[in-house]
Amino acid sequence: MKPLSARRSMTLSVLDVGTSKIVCIIAELKPVADGEALPGRTHIARVLGIGHTRSAGLKGGAVVNLEAVEQSIRHAVDAAERMARVEVQSVIVNLTGGRLGSLKQSAEVDVRSGSVGLRDVERALSAAAQQGMRQGRAVLHTLPTGFSVDGQSGVVDPGGLLGQRLGVNMHIVSADASAARNLMLAVERCHLDVEAVVSTPYASGLSSLVDDEADMGVALIDMGGSTTSFAVFAGGAIVHTDAIAVGGHHVTMDVARGLSTRIAAAERLKTLYGSTVMTPADERELIAVPLVDEFERDIPNHAPKSQLTRIIQPRVEEILELVRDRLRHAGLGAEAARRVVLTGGASQLNGMHNAAQRILSAGVAPARVRTGRPLGVKGLPEAAKGPAFAAAVGLLVYPQVAHVEHFEPRASHSYARTGSDNYFARVGRWIKESF
């Protein structure tokens, strides 16, 4: 994205494309003084319109039915446009599927004039970014995490320093190119331009981390419908990103199979009575479970609440154990054992804090676990102030920090190659470039 001016207001549209819901938010970004903004932010967002609908055509965060995804996006965008009375032209969209992954690269270049200049920094960043290019992978973020001059590490801003060699360490977040392209295609078929694609855990962290959490070290876990993505922040920057294709919908399916009920009824039971912690009263408390016979009639039935907990608990523990093992394999288990922030709709399950604290900090001091909610945004309805909307609000924050990333300049293009969409896209680009 183009750098966002710290002195200009702008209207921004974002699109949170999840497996369970699709959210479109239209907001106005207004510049604020340094003392009035949250750390790392230059603007405050005021929501003008919001629309959300049930997601369709997505599995594991990836597009599996282009037509269904397109219709869901159209419904969400139309609701936001009607509320804001603004026509959406372009959006910032998030990506959860496509096997999100991290890669750390470093590069060194010669300082040509003896003093580090802007061109030297650009050459170093380009060299590190080129090393991160992989066949079949799309780069989402290229974030420099530190510089060095003549072997002296820990340099924050090398501009103007004297030296012969400039080095840079870079964190690269990527996903499968096909998943990113299909997501962009679904959005562009709705006659919308894609300004940027942001990884979901990064967006959730931008909206929900507070004070000095990112500096001290924290693991953010975004528990969505079919995916659980997570990121580690340290030293004020994101240093690791990963995802697993298991989420809250898998818990719902376990309940539906275990209690022989409809998926919609299983979701309701999970939301109202679901828990990861067993209590003595659960054996005595009965819950109504609608069973379905061969005549498609809901037959009332009752089961102890403990049976529901026994179904939910193993799946939740499996998800958290997978996250723990992935973080330890990446050498970041210590960060997860200190501080954990949970976001996403599935994180609202009763007892999730206790389960995360017990599993993620196994063998070490108990982790401090809290629920992350979107911060620093005005005009959000009460229903959108929970952890399920952290990623959507984080997309509003992203333009304020996008300038720290490095991307090679490239010509813009559209993935909507069918019918009149391609023609109008070419005409639109010609008008923008010519006038």
Image (spheres, rainbow, N blue to C red):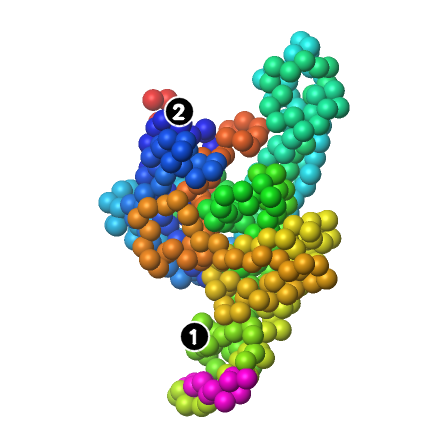
Q: Residue at x 33, y 51 (%)?
A: 380
The amino acid type found where label 1 is placed reads: Leu
Look at the image and give the residue range highlighted in magenta.
280-296
The amino acid type found where label 2 is placed reads: Glu
Taking 29 as reference, is 107 above or below it?
above
Residue 99 percent location from the top left of the image:
62, 52
Residue 231 percent location from the top left of the image:
59, 49
Instruction: Please say whether residue 282 is one of the residues in the magenta stretch.
Output: yes
The residue wearing badge 1 is: 272
Dot 2: few (<14), some (14–19), or many (≥20) neighbours within 10 Å? few
Residue 174 percent location from the top left of the image:
61, 43
Frontmost residue, 382 versus 339:
339
Instruction: Please say whether residue 295 is one of the residues in the magenta stretch.
Output: yes
Q: Residue extending furthest top?
A: 113
Q: Residue at x 64, y 65 (%)?
A: 358
Frontmost residue, 265 versus 421:
265
Q: Is residue 418 left or right of residue 231?
A: left
Please say whether residue 167 is visible from this viewpoint. Answer: no
The residue wearing badge 2 is: 433
Dot 1: few (<14), some (14–19), or many (≥20) neighbours within 10 Å? few
